[in-house]
Amino acid sequence: MLSQRLANIWISLRRASFSGGDIFGALTDGKACVYLRDLLVEHIRTTHPDVELIVGLDSRGFLFNMLLATELGVGCAPVRKKGKLAGDVVSVEYKLEYGSDTFELQRTAIKPGQKVIIVDDLLATGGSLSAASELVRKLGGVLLESLVVIELVDLDGRKRLDCDVHSLIQY
């Protein structure tokens, strides 16, 4: 059953002409959205039933963090680009293929010792997930895992990360 649900998501992604970075087209398929949600929730419940907070990355990670947090009955928090969050924030600069950027997280988003999963749509080079991991740890969170829908394996982003990574689809 699990392999069939993954196949259905993959078919939806291919129909949407997934181009190595855009998951939006596949999200127009209601069945694929339900399968995707169920697979992510099932994975978390099975591997990390003690999770307390889901952190989503700007911006496509936001599509998943609130959805997963609601299904799991836990909190959620956004990691945003510099200047987008109100209040006191912690910041991390990270390198991109074409320069650098800065991620921020509200200082009150994570309590020390809180068990956290980071979620995003895509793992490419690993820069953004690495920066988000650093933010979680700066605030004293315990990072259980980074969870992504798609991993572009040829880019070796997983090697840059200092946490467990789970990807539903490796492309």
Image (spheres, grey):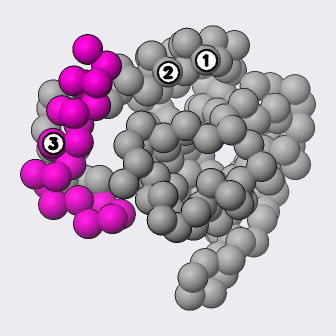
Q: Is residue 6 magenta?
A: yes
Q: Amino acid at mark 1?
A: Thr
In the image, is 109 to the left or to the right of 27? right
Q: Quadrant of the N terminus?
A: top left
Residue 63 or residue 171, whichever sits in front: 171
Name the residue at 72% across, 30% down. Answer: 144
Q: What separation in Å lies between label 2 and label 1 (alpha carbons)?
A: 6 Å
Name the residue at 78% across, 65% down. Answer: 92
In the image, is 64 to the left or to the right of 125? left
Residue 43 is labelled as 2
Q: Position of residue 68 (x, y in %)?
A: 47, 26
Q: Position of residue 11 (x, y in %)?
A: 15, 42
Name the residue at the bottom extreme: 98
Name the residue at 47% across, 32% down. Answer: 66
Q: Position of residue 90 (x, y in %)?
A: 81, 57
Upstream in sequence: badge 3 or badge 1? 3
Q: In the rendered structure, which segment of residues is drawn in magenta? A: 1-22
Rendered view: 102 above or below 90: below
Look at the magenta stretch and give its main secondary structure.
Answer: helix
Q: Is residue 15 magenta?
A: yes
Residue 113 or residue 144, whichever sits in front: 144
Residue at label 1? 47
- Mark 2 closeness class: few <14, some 14–19, many ≥20 residues within 10 Å: some
Q: What separation in Å lies between label 3 and label 1 (alpha carbons)?
A: 26 Å
Rendered view: 89 above or below 63: below
Rendered view: 118 above or below 75: below
Residue 109 seen in the figure: no
Secondary structure under tag 2 reads: helix
Residue 42 seen in the figure: yes
Q: Amino acid at mark 3?
A: Ile
